[in-house]
Image (cartoon, rainbow, N blue to C red):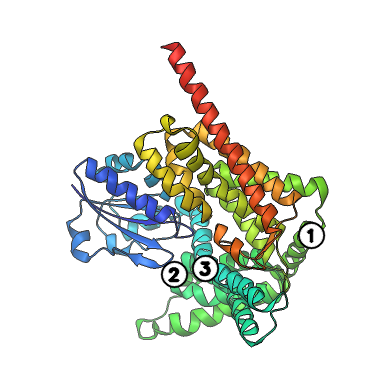
Amino acid sequence: MKIVGITSCSTGIAHTYMAAENLEIAAKKRNIEIKVETQGSIGSENVLTEQEIAEADAVIIAASTSVNKDRFNGKRLLEVDVTEAIDHPDDLFDRAPNAAIYSTATEVKSEAKAEKSGIYSHLMTGVSYMIPFVVAGGICIALAFAFGGINAKGELASAINELGGIAMGLMWPILGGYVAFSIADRPGLVPGMVAGMIASSMNAGFLGALLGGFLAGYTVHWLKKVLKLPSAFSGLLPVLILPVVSVLFVGLVMKFIVGIPITALNEGITNWLNSLSGMNSVLLGLLLGGMMAIDLAGPIGKAAYFFGVASLTNLGAGETSMVMAAVMVSGMVPPLAMALSSTVLGKNLYSKEEREAGKSAWVLGLSFISEGAIPFAAADPLRVLASVTVGSAITGALSMIFKCGIAVPHGGFFVFLIPGAVENVLLYVLALAIGTAVSGFLVTAVKVFSQKKQAAKE
């Protein structure tokens, strides 16, 4: 059997490549010929050729973002979330040969059914394009502080700070534009980016750009259905009529109807976050920390991450976000805890493959890639997820107690080394160490208890 596939996740960093690797490993065991195209944050790699697609018996698309399926017209196509390829690759090979044959007609019929999951996919597409702008901008600003102090004094520091501000300023147009692009393809980009820019200018932030992107996407999607022109004038539709009509409609709705309440809500959330202190901030840290671990960068973890990113958007020069700090450090705990357990505390409790995965998990954890714990959770979900959630929640709470703040949304331990990027950095490292130790010892203890209980039964 010959299979071709595509994998893609919201950030394009970890799940994309883990899914491709698991599909390839499972295919090799079953003597299935496979080629997987990865659509990650650096673009498409291992791109499928027309001949490879033509020769394939079936297509597997494992993605949490929108993937263009036009190439696969007439092929049996199985479309699932990226996590299914990580957790159950063999199941996909069983289902793919009997999957429905993809065609434009099939797509139209299934459109309403897929809309609910499509909304999440559109959101993930927008976020995957936005995150590199936030990361690049945040780290540039942190580097400016390192070179020129908290006010970025000096020609070089000022220039780097300006670059960071430009990158950060583009994140809302990018978010709105690519949410709309996911819904309505290329014609959605213009009104989506305009909506994101309006959200930025009105201080409507993440919610405004997101809502504007959906408004723009569905507006263009509807216009493409209702506007019919003679073939002689059809070329005017994508370059003149759709951009102008959609920008006018979406822009005016954003400016006079949607933007005002969303701005008020965004400012209310910001003021609430700034007012948090004492037990309230600790409880928020506990909640966000637990969310970051309970599904290892799944929908719950991503919700916590988006909340952290949103808290960065209204920061002034030299300011850091305690919420983002709690989110990032909590997300580092699961892979580090599993690395500690599998390579130091309880080597004999793990298979050879898991011990090897534990070595990689040290690097993944330090890089803030929570997915590094997935191989362990897949083998023993209840004990692993419960243990890492406890440690992550404690770490999030400690980060709040220690009043740690961070100026960037990604980068893990490596941004700890940039002066000005992390507030109270030594206490931040302490919070990470405590959470990692708690989860590492806890998961080791429950595995030992489980093995003793099993031995007693036998």
| Callout 3 amino acid | Pro
- Tag 1, which secondary structure? helix
Residue 329: image location, x then y, percent: 61, 52
Rendered position, 211 above or below 349 = below
Give me the disc on residue 185: 2
Quarter-of-image position of residue 44 = bottom left
- Secondary structure category for the residue under label 3: helix
Q: Secondary structure at mark 2?
A: loop
Q: How many neighbours does mark 3 have within 10 angstroms: few (below 14), some (14-19), or many (20 or more)?
A: some
Residue at 58% from the left image edge and 76% from the top image edge: 167
Q: Earlier in the sequence, mark 1 or mark 3?
A: 3
Alpha carbon distance from label 1 to label 3: 26 Å
Do callouts 1 and 3 mark residues in contact (Cβ within 8 Å)?
no
Residue sitting nearer the eye, 424 or 213? 424
- In-image side of 66 versus 106 (left or right): right
Question: Is 278 displayed left or right of 406 in the figure?
Answer: right
Q: Please tell me the numbered disc located at residue 274.
A: 1
Category of crowding for the residue at label 1, using alpha-carbon neighbours closer than 10 angstroms: few (below 14), some (14–19), many (at least 20): some
Residue type beneath disc 1: Asn
Q: Residue at x 31, y 47 (%)?
A: 23
Q: How many marks?
A: 3
Q: Is residue 7 left or right of residue 382?
A: left
Image coordinates of residue 82 in percent, x first then y, are 41, 50
- Between 335 and 71, the residue placed more toward the observer is 335
C-alpha span from label 2 to label 1? 38 Å
Q: Along the line of sight, which residue is nearer the eye, 279 or 30?
A: 279
Q: Is residue 172 visible?
A: no
Near-viewer residue (224 or 392): 392
Q: Which mark is residue 429?
A: none
Where in the figure is residue 75, as x and y percent of width and height? 25, 55
Residue ID for mark 3: 132
- Say above or below: 350 vs 41: above
